[in-house]
Image (cartoon, grey):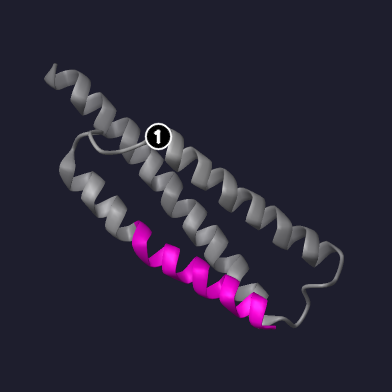
Amino acid sequence: MISELLEALMIISFGLSWPMNITKAWKARTTKGTSLPFMLLVDFGYAAGITSKITMMISHTFSGNWTAILGFAFYIANFLMVTTGICIYFRNNSLDRIRL
């Protein structure tokens, strides 16, 4: 139980940081200070977490565990936020090329 709670807290704390990152990247309008490989690796990690939770659901070790369900929801939310950041990266990359 404590491990699931700690995992959920980790995912929630990461989830609180991504909106700040997205806002900063959107306003900056440049890729300077942004690492595409880092964001892709983080998204891969979230995809692995989502796959892990789906595997747990299929094997029925997931049912009734609200911390696991909350963690699953936050994995998806975080994955979508990082994906948004990746899309902003490509937008900003285009803006950088226009300025050159």
The quarter of the picture where the N terminus appears is bottom right
Residue 85 rendering spot, x and y as whole percentages: 37, 45
| 10 Å crowding of disc 1: few (<14), some (14-19), many (20+) | some
Query: As shown in the figure, which amino acid type bears the numbered disc 1?
Result: Leu
Residue 44 rendering spot, x and y as whole percentages: 57, 44
Whether 60 is drawn above or below 55: the answer is: below
Name the one closer to the observer, 29 or 34.
34
Q: Which residues are magenta?
A: 1-18
Q: Quadrant of residue 89?
A: top left
- Does residue 47 belong to the magenta stretch? no
Whether 59 is drawn above or below 41: the answer is: below
Name the one closer to the observer, 52 or 94.
52
Residue at point 14%, 16% (across, down)? 100
Residue at point 58%, 49% (across, down)? 45
Residue 11 lies left or right of residue 54; in this view the side is left
Residue 89 lies left or right of residue 69; in this view the side is left
The secondary structure making up most of the magenta span is: helix
Residue 33 rendering spot, x and y as whole percentages: 25, 38
Residue 99 lies left or right of residue 31; in this view the side is left
List the single residue furthest toward the top. Answer: 100
User: How many numbered discs?
Assistant: 1
Whether 6 is drawn above or below 41: the answer is: below
- Under circle 1, the secondary element is helix
Residue at point 40%, 34% (across, down)? 36
Residue at point 28%, 59% (across, down)? 20
List the single residue furthest toward the left. Answer: 99
- Does residue 14 belong to the magenta stretch? yes
Residue 9 rendering spot, x and y as whole percentages: 51, 75
* Residue marked by disc 1: 36
